[in-house]
Amino acid sequence: MAPRVAIVGAGFGGLCMAIQLERAGIRSYTVFEKAGDLGGTWRDNSYPGAGCDIPSHLYSYSFEKYASWTRRYPEQPEILGYLEHCADKYDVRRKIRFSTEVRRAVFDGAQWQISTADGTEAFDVLVMGVGQLNRPRMPDIPGMAEFEGVSFHSARWNHEHDLTGRRVAVIGNGSSAAQLIPRVAERAEHLHVFQRTPNWVIPKPDAAFGPLTRLAFHYVPGLQRAYREWIYRYAEGTLYPALSQGWSVGLLKQRALRHLRDQVPDPALRAKLTPDYPPGCKRVVIDSSFYPALTRPNVSVVTDKIVRVTSKGVETTEGTYEVDTIVYATGFKSTEFLAPMEVVGRDGQTLEERWADGAEAYLGISVPGFPNMFMLYGPNTNLGHNSIVFMIECQVDHVMACLPYLGGSGPIEVRPEVMAAWRRQLDAAMDRMVWGAGCQSWYKTASGRVTNNWPGTTTLYRRLTARPPRPAYRVIGAG
Ligand code: N01
């Protein structure tokens, strides 16, 4: 009998899992989605200018080519449209329970008991597809509640609030801020960008596909595949070595510095925007309109330390900036992974307890003590150089390869010694990566452990996840 599979989340990960189950003829699955619609991060992040800095043809499922992409780099509405297209084409929407948040998942020795506001239901397999960036992180600045204007997080954009003629503060200057700042600057009377740490920025060579190119993508056999392969190889061959401190590290820095020189003529502003840590340590911003926006007369870059938010604006060590709107582009609770869901494994251990020193999982997918539970885009599977969708597909393939073993003698879990070996390999590989020292980022815990990023090439990750899974797992109770 086919296993009953619970999938949590209807973003890129959860949908991919559901589609592959459908394609394999397994219909005994349910997707739980806390929001009223699908799309995950691409539903939540609808701020002006939201888009992806990985090219469209690579930021999509390998099994669902899409000749309709209109640009090299997709914007948020188009990505959401792509996910809706996939959900409809593979007929998985009917299996999604919208507005149903999984609060608790408890392994009872044989099955997972999944609790939502509607009650508790048993499943054989639990697949977590909640991503790493689904919970906005509001900063802890004194006085935020006293602000009398309008404030919101970049991932919870207030579309009712017209920014025309407003005095706006944007706190943060990461990838989200870099995308929304140019759009906000076009409307606001004045925009103050509060920058705590400058980011390395490289150009995004975006362009609309012309009618001929789009026709070619439609009709020339193999063209989409070849184009995707080319982008993939470029990212692996040039960007990865920069992050692993290999041959292209100097090139990345030169490219970023040239971009800064080309786009920011004022030396004082340039100095403010020049990072003092190695490129790639924090996520490199890939954007061509961010710097020009910062040079506009109605935009100022504030680097003083923020002291508090007042009823009228933002107070720093150097003065007060009166604004009527504050946008918190302050990122996500990235290292907490499955929180606030309570996940209780074998012997009553919670994931929170298991992960007291930081999240970890074999291949980023499986955790000892949590049988028949799999994660998509779990710990140490984020990338700074390539498409997460590629990683998600590798993870879904691994779960699919595990499924035949699940109906046999009992639930399976990854062997503790395999997990220990995995941790040692990760630690060794992490040593050569640029993320470890010199900066603070969402890739790591407060204690400095990198829990989010994958330190290898994605080609290696594909090879590791494609190995027959059985030797790494044991049937619980069987030793
Ligand atoms: O968040 P972030 P994001 N006072 O964590 C600042 C992906 N993404 O939403 O650097 C003042 O990067 C913080 O300052 P600092 C992408 O992977 C992808 O921008 O910590 N400032 C920083 O500037 C990305 O990396 C796309 O000193 C405070 C900012 O807030 C990830 O999402 C597009 C502060 C947070 O930056 C997250 O990006 C958009 C405080 N108290 C996003 N607290 C694509 O194109 C925080 N900050 C695929």
Image: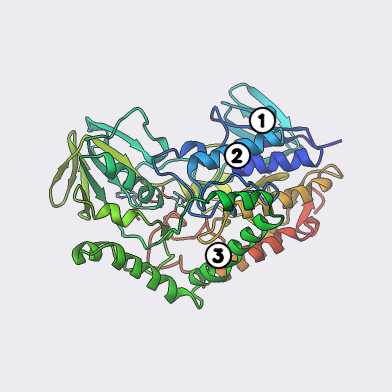
Residue 265 placement: quadrant: bottom left
Residue 114 placement: quadrant: top right
Image location of residue 369, percent across then percent down: 68, 48
- Mark 2 close to ligand 1, CB under 8 Å: no
| Disc 3 packing (10 Å; few <14; some 14–19; many ≥20) | some
Looking at the picture, does residue 376 appear above or below residue 81? Answer: below
Say which residue appears at 46% left-offset and 69% top-offset.
Answer: 434
Q: Are marks 2 and 1 in contact (CB under 8 Å)?
A: no
- The kind of secondary structure element at disc 2 is helix
Query: Which badge, 2 or 1, comes first in the chain's sequence?
Result: 2
- The kind of secondary structure element at disc 3 is helix
Residue hosting label 1: 93
- Which corner quadrant holds the N terminus? top right
Image location of residue 28, percent across then percent down: 77, 32
Judge depth for marks 2 and 1 and give the one in front: 2
Amino acid marked by disc 3: Ala
Residue hosting label 2: 83
Amino acid marked by disc 1: Arg
| Disc 1 packing (10 Å; few <14; some 14–19; many ≥20) | many
Say which residue appears at 54% left-offset and 68% top-offset.
Answer: 240
Looking at the picture, does residue 278 appear above or below residue 370? Answer: below
> Which is nearer the eye, 293 or 102?
293
> Which is nearer the eye, 409 or 117?
117
Query: Which badge, 3 or 2, comes first in the chain's sequence?
Result: 2
Numbered tag placed on residue 235 in the rendering: 3
Say which residue appears at 68% left-offset and 61% top-offset.
Answer: 462
Residue 100 relative to residue 272: left or right:
right
- Spatial separation of the CA atoms under disc 3 and disc 2: 23 Å
Amino acid marked by disc 2: Leu
Q: Are marks 3 and 2 in contact (CB under 8 Å)?
A: no
- The kind of secondary structure element at disc 1 is helix
Query: Which badge, 1 or 3, comes first in the chain's sequence?
Result: 1
